[in-house]
Amino acid sequence: MIRIAAVGDVHVDKDVVGRYRPALEELPDQADALLVAGDLTRHGTPEEARCFAKEFGGLAVPVVVVLGNHDHQSDQQEQVTEVLTDAGITVLEGAATVLEIRGHRLGIAGTKGFGGGFAGACASNFGEREMKDFVGTTERFATVLENALNSVECDALVALTHYAPVPETLVGEPLEIYAFLGSYQLGRAIDAAPTALALHGHAHHGSERGRTPGGVPVRNVAHPVIKQAYNVYQLLSDEVDATLATAR
Ligand SMILES: [Fe+2]
């Protein structure tokens, strides 16, 4: 069995440093790796990225992240990525990584993803150039996720995104904004690979648990949803959701 800790939307700035650290210090007793589902910062500045790296870096387990829309706010995502990478954090965008964990290969494929909506209420590739560009972006992120998922050979495969791949984990958000919170194309990409678990954030008022049309468990790990420093999920196990020894 592999245990992974996950959280998203931690929105770290100076005032947040120290808030997560006590729970993170205990993380190696709970899980083999930490995955963070984007919106690491508030406005995507390198200064905030340094705060995130201070809070979430230097752990005894590997830390793998994707960026979120907030991490793009200052158009400095390359610098943000560099700060995180220099701190030993793996940043995935249309890429995958494999972690060797107690004799098992854990594959993690990640991308920020994008909005677009879900069946019956989604943007379509028709009409103005701006709308085609919007949907083109949706489809591009889904394609890179599918390719990344299918690029790894591993025993357990996880999809890590910021935007949601299914509408079930958005329940609690206003229906009117679902199209800005995720897209069905991400779910389709997840189902086009032997994915064991999909993790996302972004929907602060959403719900934790869902499933893709193909049956892959989906978990919204946005901090306001899980209400603790991280949740723990199990792979190569009958039960996805783990109970923390000491809940945070
Ligand atoms: Fe977000």
Image (spheres, rainbow, N blue to C red):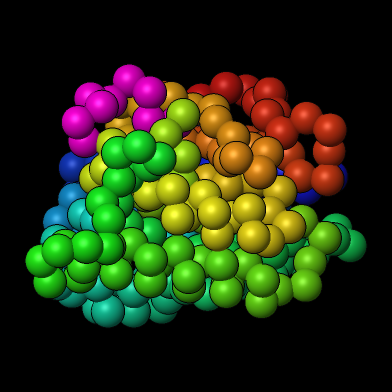
Q: Where in the figure is residue 154, as x and y percent of width and height? A: 79, 66
Please state the horizontal and vertical placement of residue 133, each as a whole percent of the image: 20, 70
Near-viewer residue (7 or 142):
142
Name the residue located 41 percent from the left edge and 78 percent from the top edge. Answer: 86
Q: Is residue 146 above or below residue 179?
A: below
Q: Residue furthest right?
A: 103
In the rendered image, is residue 198 in sight? yes
Give the residue at x 21% y 54%: 70
- The residue that appears at 52% across and 75% down in the rendered structure is 95
Relative to 52, residue 176 above or below: above
Relative to residue 43, is residue 186 drawn left or right? Answer: right
| Residue furthest front in the image | 127
- In what quadrant of the picture does the N terminus appear? top right
Q: Position of residue 201 (x, y in %)?
A: 39, 43
Magenta-colored span: 169-177
Looking at the image, residue 205 sits to the left or right of residue 45; the answer is: right
The answer to whether residue 34 is seen in the rendering is: no
Q: Is residue 234 above or below residue 54?
A: above
x%, y% of residue 22? Answer: 47, 37
How many marks on residues?
0
**Left or right: 193, with 153 as reference point:** left
Q: Is residue 171 magenta?
A: yes
Within the magenta stretch, is there residue 73?
A: no
Q: Nearer the viewer, residue 60 or 3?
A: 3
Which picture quadrant has residue 48?
bottom left
